[in-house]
Image: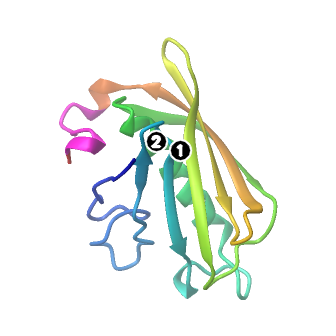
């Protein structure tokens, strides 16, 4: 079963209050996999007819970090790796998936993929996060926003 995660106001990727944001709706399933279906437009354009690489990097940054937060861990990113396999077309439905792949004592690793309508992986990424609860003392976790 999937549950919708609350949006984050002014967040560039998942907030609906930001007039320049992407405004994604995010879902997490019982296995902890974070997903979204979305379409990018001219506001995210880089090369004509395609998304800017920074837009896809921002989406994966949000997805790979938020999947860790959705698991109840207050973390900060220490490393992001983004791999571009194919350009992301504008005005076509895209999807992403993100999941936690490994947990160590202090580091959490996650991966993410943005897929084209036919399921081809267009952009993939890997993130390393460290538990940093003091950095977020006044921040509620994703599921409680």
Query: Of 121 and 60, which appears nearest the observer?
Result: 121
The residue tagged 2 is: 67
Q: Is residue 17 left or right of residue 120?
A: left
Q: Position of residue 42 (x, y in %)?
A: 57, 87
Q: Which residue is mark 1?
A: 64
Q: Mark 2 and 1 residues: CB-CB less than 8 Å, in contact?
A: yes
Q: Position of residue 62 (x, y in %)?
A: 48, 52
Crowd around label 2: few <14 · some 14–19 · many ≥20 (10 Å)? many
**What residue is at 33 percent from the left and 65 percent from the top?**
15
- Between residue 116 and residue 137, name the one nearer to us: 116
Count of numbered circles on the image: 2
State which region is magenta: 136-144
Rendered image: mark on residue 124: none
In the rendered image, residue 126, in percent from the top left (x then y), is placed at 65, 40
Q: Is residue 139 magenta?
A: yes
Q: Position of residue 77 (x, y in %)?
A: 50, 37
Q: How far apart are labels 2 and 1 at the CA level?
A: 6 Å
Residue 83, placed above or below residue 49: above
Viewer-side residue, 105 vs 96: 96
Q: Give the structural element (helix, strand or loop) at label 1.
A: helix
């Amino acid at each position: 079963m999937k549950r919708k995660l609350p949006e984050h106001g002014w967040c560039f990727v998942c907030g609906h209050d930001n007039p320049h944001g992407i405004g994604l709706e995010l879902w997490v399933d019982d296995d902890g996999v974070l997903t979204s279906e979305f379409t990018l437009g001219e506001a995210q354009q880089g090369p004509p007819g395609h998304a800017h690489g920074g837009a896809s990097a921002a989406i994966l940054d949000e997805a790979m970090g938020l999947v860790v937060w959705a698991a109840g861990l207050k973390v900060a990113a220490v490393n992001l790796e983004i791999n571009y396999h194919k350009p992301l077309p504008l005005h076509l439905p895209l999807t992403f998936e993100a999941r936690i792949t490994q947990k160590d004592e202090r580091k959490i690793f996650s991966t993410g993929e943005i897929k084209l309508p036919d399921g081809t992986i267009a952009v993939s990424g890997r993130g390393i996060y460290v538990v940093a609860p003091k950095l977020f003392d006044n921040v509620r976790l994703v599921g409680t926003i």
